[in-house]
Amino acid sequence: MSAGALPDHSRLTLLLRPDCSLCEQMLGDLRSLQAQLPLPPLRIIDVDSDPLLQRRYGLKVPVLLIDDTPICSYRLDTAELRRMLNRP
C-alpha cells in the first residue's frame, strides 16, 4: 500500500433516499465507475433509516462516504473519489 492509500478493508457508503433522482444518478454513475476500476465494497443506506444520519446528511443526499469521511454530495465527484482512493 502506498502512502496515503486506503486500507483494503475500506468501504464506500452511499446515503440516499428513495425516489430521489440525484440519488439514482449517483448510484448509476458509481456502478459505471465500478466497471472501469476496482472500488471498495459499496453499502447503500436509506438516510431516513437512521435519525443520526438523517440529521447529519438529510438535506445533502446523495452523499458518498469512504468509511465515515464524506467524499461528495449531490453529484459523483470522480476526481475526488479517485484522489481519496489514491488511484490514477
Image (cartoon, rainbow, N blue to C red):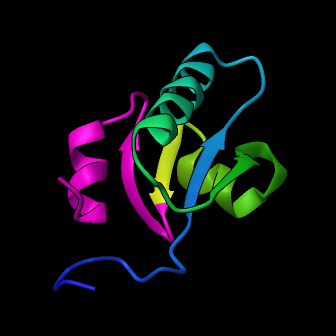
Residue 47 vertical position relative to residue 26 in the rendered view, above or below: below
Residue 58 as seen in the image, left or right of residue 39: right
Q: Is residue 27 magenta?
A: no
* Residue at the image position 57 percent from the left and 24 percent from the top: 28
Q: Quadrant of residue 38?
A: bottom left
| Residue 16 percent coordinates (x, y) | 65, 37
Residue at image location 26% in from the left, 77% down from the top: 5
Q: Position of residue 57 (x, y in %)?
A: 55, 48
Describe residue 10's horizontal placement relative to residue 53 as left or right. Answer: left
Task: Name the residue located 40 percent from the left edge and 46 percent from the top edge.
Answer: 37
Residue 1 coordinates in the image, percent (x, y): 28, 86
Residue occupying the point 61% across, 13% down: 21
Q: Is residue 85 left or right of residue 8?
A: left
Work out whether residue 13 or residue 4 is closer to the camera in this orientation and state it: 4
Left or right: residue 86 versus residue 9 is left
In front of the other: 26 or 17: 26
Q: Which region of the structure is painted magenta?
A: 66-88
For residue 73, which quarter of the picture? top left
Placement of 21 over or under 78, stated as above or below: above
